[in-house]
Amino acid sequence: MVRTKKNIEKRSSSGSKRHLKILDWTIIVFIVLAGGYIMWQYSVPAKELPPQHRVPDKGAIKVELFGGCGRGSEVMRIAGYLREIGVDVVDIKQESGYIYPSSLIVDRCGNSIIADSLAGLIGIPKNRVVLQRYDLMVDATIVVGLDYPTIVNKLSRKEI
């Protein structure tokens, strides 16, 4: 085969066409991958702050305090801290007659979000939240046990 100017131009143009085809497909694949990534970012829901970091609106949560630590003054102190951060303390029963070794939250309305939020606010583990529904005017009952110093420390450090 004789090399002519025409054959050389044909070969070089077919080679450059092939390079352009590869470049075109590379760009298409990149655009499809970028579009897929953007769509995936929009489909993933935004992360919401956990309930323990949210401070409720003033009066949004109504609670009663139940003193089970034998120290009425500490129960009143905890009630003051709760009122400062916006929890509506409706009733305080200072002396229960029983001493509770650890504090707990009794969910009265069946709304676990409220109970979990309270647990986070006062530093009680979520495994000490109990559901016991009654037709009360409160959302939850906080039973203050002998571990009241941890509640006082947690509430006194709250930045409002």
Image (cartoon, rainbow, N blue to C red):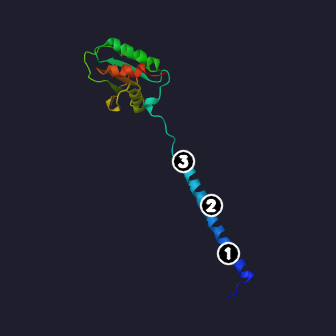
Residue type indicated by callout 1:
Ser
What's under tag 3, amino acid-wise? Gln
**Under tag 3, what secondary structure?**
helix
Dot 2, crowdedness within 10 Å: few (<14), some or many (≥20)?
A: few
**What amino acid is labelled 2 in the image?**
Ile
Q: Position of residue 155 (x, y in %)?
A: 41, 21
Lower position in the chain sequence, tag 1 or tag 3: 1
Look at the picture and state if 110 lies above or below 82. Answer: below
- Mark 1 — residue? 14
CA separation in Å, label 1 and label 3: 41 Å
Task: Choose the circle earlier in sequence order: 1 or 2.
Answer: 1
Dot 1 falls on a residue whose secondary structure is: helix
Residue at the spot of label 3? 41
Sequence-first disc among 3 and 2: 2
> 10 Å neighbourhood of mark 1: few (<14), some, or many (≥20)?
few
Q: Please tell me whether mark 3 or mark 2 is closer to you in this view.
A: 2
Q: Which mark is residue 27?
A: 2
